[in-house]
């Protein structure tokens, strides 16, 4: 019986298509109608068919900062015009209704006077092996942070299961793994410092970067802030 079925099984295996892993599509897609300046774009979600809460969100303008100075400039420009701002990462799976700038409804009226900041290009990682710390830009994917730490002979204490999440996103949403070591599996409990870009008055250029360390009065609130207190920079 084994000899009888061996040949058909071999033939069947040659006919099956090869499985190729692909990353999720970018959450922000632009059709180019805005002249390449980030306008005429749509914020969506890979699970868009599940619920009306995941309906696409039209976005008037998208900024792609590559440095903290770029983040400050983007927030300052929106702050000066009193524009609502939301932030997404390169592989965001946030429900668009929550990440949609403006009134959150995804209507074109709410999108016309709002700004979306994508951290897809803000992804630097620096390791201080002596201090046993990693400094990561908000858009750095978890996989990049793990690889950088490993290259310096270190490892992360805690991490969620999916390696495509951004550092800013996983910290500000309270993402966690299952570690029982030290402070436990919640990633934000292992953060020792962060930098937050917040709106400011005209005297401060309409935006500024605030440095916070563990023990500061606002540190815990800024960690798991769901993006409501400002833009996590580092």
Image: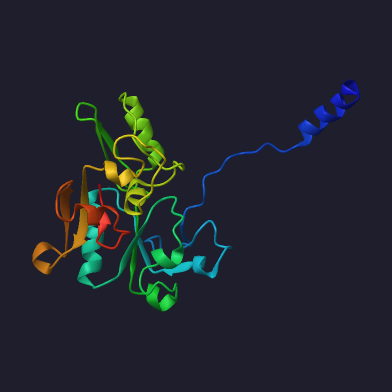
For image coordinates 29% across by 40% down, the residue present is 183
Pick the quarter of the image with the N terminus.
Answer: top right
Which residue is pictured at 39% across the width and 69% down the height?
60
Tell me where residue 62 appears, x and y as whole percent.
Answer: 36, 61
Q: Quadrant of residue 12?
A: top right
In the image, is residue 3 above or below residue 219? Answer: above
Residue 33 seen from this side: no
Whole-percent x, y for residue 16 in the image:
75, 37
Name the foreground residue: 34 vs 66.
Answer: 66
The residue sitting at the top extreme is 3
Relative vertical location of residue 82 with respect to residue 223 in this rendering, above or below: below
Residue situated furthest left in the rendering: 203
Tell me where residue 17 appears, x and y as whole percent.
72, 38
Q: Is residue 181 visible?
A: yes
The one of 35 and 216 positioned closer to us in this rendering = 216
* Spot occupied by residue 52 in the image (x, y as percentages of width and height): 54, 70
Q: Is residue 47 left or right of residue 201?
A: right
Colour scheme employed for the rendering of this structure: rainbow
Q: Is residue 212 left or right of residue 140?
A: left
Task: Report the side of 56 relative to 15 (left or right).
Answer: left
């Amino acid at each position: 019986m084994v000899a009888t079925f061996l040949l058909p099984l071999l033939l069947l295996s040659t006919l099956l298509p090869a499985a190729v892993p692909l990353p999720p599509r970018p959450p922000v897609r632009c059709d180019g109608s805005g002249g390449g300046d980030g306008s005429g774009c749509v914020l969506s979600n890979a699970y868009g068919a599940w619920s009306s809460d995941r309906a696409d969100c039209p976005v008037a303008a998208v900024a792609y900062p590559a440095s903290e100075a770029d983040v400050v400039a983007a927030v300052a420009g929106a702050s000066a015009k009193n524009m609502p701002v939301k932030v997404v990462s390169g592989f965001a799976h946030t429900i668009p209704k929550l990440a949609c700038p403006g009134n959150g409804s995804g209507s074109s009226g709410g999108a016309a006077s709002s700004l979306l900041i994508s951290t897809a290009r803000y992804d630097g990682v620096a390791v201080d092996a002596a201090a046993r710390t990693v400094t990561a830009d908000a858009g750095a994917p978890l996989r990049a942070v793990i690889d950088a730490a490993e290259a310096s002979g270190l490892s992360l204490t805690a991490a969620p299961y999916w390696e495509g999440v951004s550092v800013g996103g996983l910290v500000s949403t309270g993402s966690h793994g299952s570690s029982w070591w030290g402070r436990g599996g919640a990633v934000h409990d292992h953060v020792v410092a962060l930098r937050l870009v917040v709106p400011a008055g005209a005297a401060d250029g309409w935006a500024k970067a605030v440095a916070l360390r563990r023990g500061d009065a606002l540190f815990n609130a800024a960690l798991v802030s769901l993006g409501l207190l400002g833009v996590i920079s580092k």
